């Protein structure tokens, strides 16, 4: 008979995990204190949403809200508190953060879990450079709280207290993949699929789009080279990959979007937030068309969000994966080691 699998609740296994979990608690407390010292308000966003998010390759958990009369309304567990937070900004809040659970289907690896903790925060009236500095400060705070001078992950190392490397997406593609990405983007931001296909150093399918090829190059060639030795800020994403970010004022081919890496691991994703509801709707519909084509489904559009964007002031925001940050800071090898009760 094969030996029984050791469950996370087995006393011996829990004893091994407990130091990591206590480090998580200390980091969480330090983060809350950091925001309190800067007069941020902690908000608690509802998990049930009309839409889980409208990115083509993001998968939500569907459920039904049953009314007192027995009628059913489609609802989803949110993949991010972003839509709710933006409604709060529209309502008049200026500096907010949410630390809570989010849900993403089709995701389970040492770096992904179907349920995990996301730290999301917003600064009203601030440029996105301000929230990049926030993200760097919080990563260093986690390292300081855990008492680590060096992050390690699968043979890679990053010194969190060293000066960060700042790379535009175009420079990173040139440096690691030999691709001049912006040469495949028109002056108005329109991507040229055939130009990127000719330049791509990685294999791709004949039906894959510019964004698909971009993602393959990013994952296979670029990301493994980011955050090695020190943190890397990857910024100025092409507008085709803008998601909910506004177009940059210095180059209409790129958007105010950044990601933060350590040891090749993405820790945070942030934007100078888009507040144009018509443009946001256009992007959502384009993403849902891709989702329909690839996965045979689409998610509803949150009309309340579009209404909120019309009155939302300029802002910048970031989503940071708390479990991944704790994993690196505490020296774990998988995010389920730093989750109190991992999803079975």
Image (cartoon, rainbow, N blue to C red):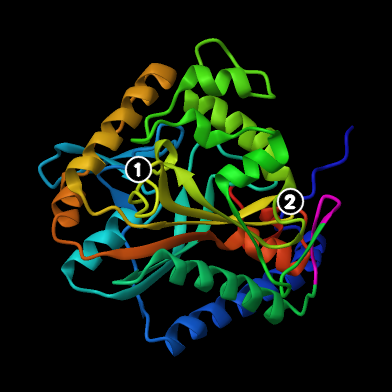
Q: Residue at x 61, y 46 (%)?
A: 171
Q: Is residue 256 above or below residue 12?
A: above
Measuring from the top left, give residue 289's x and y in whole percent.
Answer: 32, 23
User: Mark 1 and mark 2 in contact (Cβ < 8 Å)?
Assistant: no
Q: What residue is rendered at 52% in x and 50% in y?
A: 115
Q: Which residues are magenta?
A: 150-156
Q: Earlier in the sequence, mark 2 or mark 1?
A: 2
* Residue 76 x %, y %: 33, 43
Using the rendered image of the protein, determine whether residue 339 is visible from the camera's viewpoint: no
Quadrant where the C terminus sits is top right
The front one of 1 and 104 is 104
Spot occupied by residue 73 in the image (x, y as percentages of width and height): 19, 39
Location of residue 5 by image quarter: top right
Front residue of this view, candidates 138 and 234: 234
Cα separation between marks 2 and 1: 33 Å
The residue identified by callout 1 is 53
Q: Is residue 215 above or below residue 328?
A: above
Callout 1 crowding tier (Cα within 10 Å): few <14, some 14–19, many ≥20: many
Say which quadrant the N terminus sits in: top right
Percent position (x, y) of residue 283?
29, 36
Q: How many residues crowd around disc 2 within 10 Å: few (fewer than 14), some, or many (20 or more)?
A: few
Q: Which mark is residue 7?
A: 2
Q: Secondary structure at mark 1?
A: loop
Q: Secondary structure at mark 2?
A: loop
């Amino acid at each position: 008979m094969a030996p029984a699998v050791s469950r996370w609740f087995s006393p011996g296994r829990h004893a091994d995990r407990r130091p990591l979990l206590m480090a998580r608690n200390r980091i969480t407390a330090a983060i809350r204190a950091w925001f309190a010292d800067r007069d941020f308000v902690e908000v608690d966003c509802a998990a049930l949403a009309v839409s889980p998010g409208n990115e083509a390759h993001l998968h939500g958990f569907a459920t039904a809200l049953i009314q007192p009369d027995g009628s059913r309304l489609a609802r989803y567990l949110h993949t991010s508190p972003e839509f709710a937070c933006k409604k709060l900004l529209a309502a008049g809040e200026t500096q907010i953060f949410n630390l809570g659970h989010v849900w993403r289907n089709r995701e389970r690896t040492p770096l992904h879990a179907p349920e995990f903790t996301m730290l999301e925060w917003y600064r009203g009236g601030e440029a996105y450079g301000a929230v990049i500095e926030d993200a760097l400060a919080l990563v260093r705070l986690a390292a300081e709280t855990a008492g680590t001078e060096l992050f390690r992950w699968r043979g890679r190392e990053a010194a969190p207290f060293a000066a960060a490397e700042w790379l535009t997406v175009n420079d990173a593609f040139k440096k690691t993949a030999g691709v001049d990405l912006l040469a495949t983007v028109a002056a108005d931001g329109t991507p040229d699929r055939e130009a990127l296909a000719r330049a791509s150093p990685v294999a791709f399918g004949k039906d894959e789009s510019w964004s698909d090829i971009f993602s393959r190059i990013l994952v296979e060639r670029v990301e493994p080279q980011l955050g090695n030795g020190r943190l890397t800020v990857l910024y100025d994403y092409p507008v085709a990959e803008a998601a909910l970010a506004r177009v940059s004022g210095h180059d209409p081919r790129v958007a105010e979007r950044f990601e933060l890496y350590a040891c090749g691991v993405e820790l945070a994703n942030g934007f100078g937030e888009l507040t144009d509801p018509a443009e946001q709707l256009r992007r959502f519909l384009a993403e849902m068309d891709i989702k329909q084509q690839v996965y045979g489904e689409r998610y509803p559009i949150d009309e309340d969000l579009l209404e909120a964007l019309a009155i939302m002031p300029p802002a910048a925001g970031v989503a940071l994966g708390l479990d991944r940050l704790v994993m690196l800071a505490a020296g774990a090898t998988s995010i389920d080691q730093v989750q109190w009760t991992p999803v079975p």
